[in-house]
Amino acid sequence: MLKELKVSTFVFIIAALFASGLAIGGFLGRTSLKKVASGEITAALVLFNPSSVYIDTVKLLNSRDPFKRLSGYYAYADTRLIDLDYLYKRFTEEESPVIKNTIIWAASRSEKTDDVIIFFKKVYKIGSKRNQEFILNYIETIDAELYNDFIEKVK
């Protein structure tokens, strides 16, 4: 009986250590990838060698070539690590209407709908007519009632 208790306690401890290791590793991995994507470099990069996809994305986003930056925004959106403050900053820095629309599209891929709407409100005010139409199209696909509220608030 005592031996069975020791074995089950040992198995429980191993499972708990494994689960906590996965949770900590996942958290540190997501945190370091968000920092890499937003241009910040941390000590976590030394410890956790991120995949070359993320490094390539950062290189593309910081390229002088607008076509490479455009590719970078698509790669950034695929990471699902959407930082709306970062995208707003990039929106204000970009000159190309196509890239600005891509930033709007990338922001729409965030799972935080309320934050996306706040982002859209900020961008709507400074965007071109085409950017505004693009924003309205995305909001209309989310929710018709939200679309009507949004139009009332931005006018």
Image (tube, grey):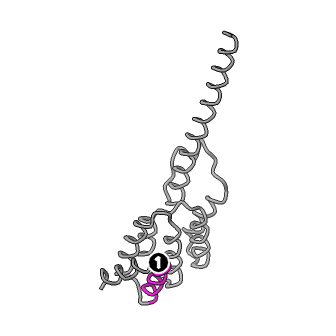
Seen from this angle, which residue lies furthest top?
2
Q: Quadrant of residue 14?
A: top right
Q: Residues within 10 Å of mark 1 (few under 14, many from 20)?
A: some
Which residue is identified by label 1? 94
Q: Position of residue 96 (x, y in %)?
A: 50, 83
Query: Helix, strand or loop at disc 1?
Result: loop
Would you say the magenta stretch is mainly helix, strand or loop? helix
Seen from this angle, which residue lies furthest front?
1
Q: Quadrant of residue 58?
A: bottom right
Chain part drawn in magenta: 130-142
| Residue displayed at 65% across by 15% down | 5
Q: Position of residue 112 (x, y in %)?
A: 45, 63
| Residue displayed at 30% across by 80% down | 153
In this rendering, the answer to whether 74 lies above or below 43 is: below
In this rendering, the answer to whether 22 lies above or below 78 is: above
Question: Type of residue at label 1?
Answer: Glu
